[in-house]
Image (cartoon, rainbow, N blue to C red):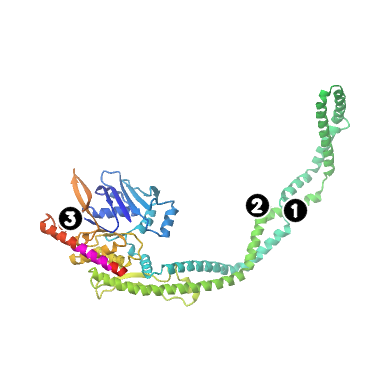
Amino acid sequence: MLLQLTIRNLAIIREVQLEFGPGFTALTGETGAGKSILIDALGLVLGARASSDLVRTGASRAWIEAVFDISHLSSGEFTATLAEFGIVPEDDQLILSREVQANGRSVARVNGQAVPAGLLATIGAALVDIHGQSDHLSLLKTERQLELLDRFAGVLPLRSELARTVREFRATLRELDQLRAQERDRAHRIDLLRYQLQEIANAQLRPGEEEELQRERARLQNAERLAMLAAEVVNSLDGEDYAPLDVLRRASLRLEELARFDPEQQSVVGQLREALYSLEDVVRTMRAYAETIESDPNRLAAIEDRLEVLRRLKRKYGGTLQEILSYAERARRELEMLESSDERIAELEARTEALAAQVVQRAEQLSQRRRQAAIALERAMSEAMRALRLGQGIFTVLFDDPAPPELLVERAATCSEHGWDRAEFLIAPNPGQEPRPLARIASGGEMARLMLALKSILSEVDETPTLVFDEVDVGIGGRSAQVVGERLWQLAQRHQVIVISHLPQIAAFADRHYKIMKQVEGGTTETLVHELRGEARLEELAAMMDGLPITPESLANARAMVERVAQRKAALAGIRVGSSS
């Protein structure tokens, strides 16, 4: 429900703030006073396209803010949309704002958080429906008409179950089609995978093998040089001509003797002994190493052959041995899947048939219940049209009935998540005329009353909390106006209803009444809004009936009208209570 609307620097509005509540709110005033600007402002904060032309002359920006109570909005989809953008309502309130700058840029916010303007439109569609002299007419959309028919028919649970089954059916059919399409190339792919796996298996790869072979190859390629260097190391330390090890051994003996006379030097004896042991180890290691070095052309050729095998496998299956082994694992899994695809195809065919049967059964049931509900809706709408002085018109729900395929799976494949039906609301305004889609009804006022008729019938199933009717009374007289007023008041028992009206018979039914007026001060035109109560409201209704100046007679007529409306409200409330009990 809309709680508050604040507007600054929009068109001829400098600043206004309207407080709203439940029930029926009327906005009245002379033509050009700015009533429709209020609706345009609400449209902007609900995501309508912004234009710099809307910014008040001399101002740098226009700003609109709407505060909503969403405590009664239990739509899971709505709360999921908010959660997706990290929006958490505080105290069950949602604050939508829109700033339109003079340079044409606009900024949208929800609870102070900047959001795309498209999100405002998504949120706004769940909060408010604006009907009348604008293009924000959700009931003109055929998908919206089908949804309202489903709500009227009470088939939303069945529709949700059908949607779930259709999604499962499509996923199964998609997998089946993929396997069937692969069937032509399956044998070739199986042969290729088998060859590749055999080639990799024959290579008997070991992790780290390539590095080991490269090190061994380096030793074989430099065998003579390695043997010579090892011999030089041994001769340098323990050679015949000059043997540093012998010198160290003699020095060690002298140092041990010295330490016997001076024990404090015992630590130096240990240091020298360790150095001697280390050099002796080096000599032993180099002698043993030199004995292992030998030139082996056959082994070198075998290593080169093995490395070439590894290089060929890497070119085909991966840059490293580990990547080759990983490829082999993937190929093994794919081969197992391909070799078992016959069983999988048979399994999917059976599953597809079963799901197709469920889709067809539920879609047929949904279509049947829709058509039954359409008959009741047609009857109720035709009666409402006559009550709203729309002539002896006829309301029709047209279903598009293409010839369905005979085969079960093909028939299920033509079913959307909403079923086969495409329903469209048609109107024949007068007897003998051909029914036409709502979008082709020329009169804006006629369109608004048709929306009112639909909304009043569907009010119990329509979850949109706030309904706005812009000039719903265009082209109707006093007798029709009273009926329209009654319908709006009855609709306001389940929704918040905001109406722009020029007729006192409609405004008199309002629970809250605002007067929009225009004044010129200092050469600047400005729109002002006042809430009317008591005598002020009677004076406005009198002026709407008989014009200015207000006379005692017109004031008395206005008072009598308000009294009659109060009696009529009480009677309608009694009927409603009696019918509900």
Q: Position of residue 510 (x, y in %)?
A: 24, 59
Classify mark 2: helix, strand or loop: loop
**Which quadrant does the C terminus fall into?**
bottom left
- Which comes sooner in the sequence, label 1 or label 2? 1
Q: Position of residue 46 (x, y in %)?
A: 34, 54
Q: Amino acid at mark 3?
A: Glu
| 18 to the left or right of 357 | left
Residue 60, above or below 117: above
Judging by the rendered image, the residue that carries numbered circle 3 is: 540
Q: Please tell me which residue is depicted at 44% across the width and 72% down the height of the picture.
A: 363
Classify mark 3: helix, strand or loop: helix
Judging by the rendered image, the residue that carries numbered circle 1 is: 305
| 196 to the left or right of 251 | left
Determine the main secondary structure of the stretch shown in magenta.
Answer: helix
Q: Position of residue 184 (x, y in %)?
A: 59, 69
Q: Amino acid at mark 1?
A: Asp
- Which comes sooner in the sequence, label 3 or label 2? 2
| 530 to the left or right of 228 | left
Q: CA distance from mark 1 to mark 3?
A: 105 Å
Judging by the rendered image, the residue that carries numbered circle 2 is: 319
Q: Are marks 1 and 2 in contact (CB under 8 Å)?
A: no
- The magenta region covers 564-575
Q: Please tell me which residue is depicted at 38% across the width and 47% down the height of the picture.
A: 112
Is residue 422 something that shows in the picture? yes
Q: CA distance from mark 3 to mark 2?
A: 87 Å
**Which quadrant does the N terminus fall into?**
bottom left
